[in-house]
């Protein structure tokens, strides 16, 4: 979704669908947190669709 990933760090979040992921990413609560995160870190966000979940 954003930036060029060098593969050193990875955080995975799971959402029911793309709409849920976008709703979370665009929420005022997350956007406030993201401002602080972006000020102190290089961030790359990727949305991968179709990744199966474990049972």
Image: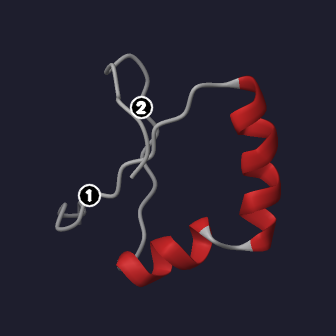
Mark 2: give few (<14), some (14-19) or many (20+) Cα within 10 Å.
few
Q: Is residue 34 above or below residue 4?
A: below
Q: Circle 1 is placed at which residue position? A: 48
Q: Position of residue 53 (x, y in %)?
A: 24, 63
Side (left or right) of 36 relative to 17: right
* Quadrant of the snapshot with the C terminus: bottom left
Q: Is mark 2 on a helix, strand or loop?
A: loop
Q: Is residue 27 above or below residue 37?
A: below
Q: Is residue 26 above or below residue 44?
A: below
Mark 1: give few (<14), some (14-19) or many (20+) Cα within 10 Å.
few
Tally the marks: 2
Q: How far apart are marks 2 and 1 (CA)?
A: 13 Å
Q: Where is residue 24 in the image (x, y as percent from the top left)?
A: 60, 71
Q: Which one is earlier in the sequence, the residue at label 2 or at label 1?
A: 2
Q: Residue at x 42, y 46 (%)?
A: 12
Q: Where is residue 28 in the image (x, y as percent from the top left)?
A: 78, 71
The chosen color scheme is secondary structure
Q: Is residue 49 above or below residue 20?
A: above
Side (left or right) of 30 relative to 24: right
The picture quadrant where one finds residue 17 is bottom left
Q: Circle 2 is placed at which residue position? A: 10
Q: Which residue is drawn at 42% across and 71% down?
A: 15
Q: Which residue is drawn at 41% across and 31% down?
A: 10
């Amino acid at each position: 979704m954003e930036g060029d990933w060098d593969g050193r760090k990875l955080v995975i979040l799971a959402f029911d669908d793309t709409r849920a992921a976008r709703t979370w990413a665009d929420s005022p609560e997350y956007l406030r947190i993201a401002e602080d995160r972006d000020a102190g870190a290089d961030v790359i966000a990727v949305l991968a669709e179709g990744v199966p979940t474990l049972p």
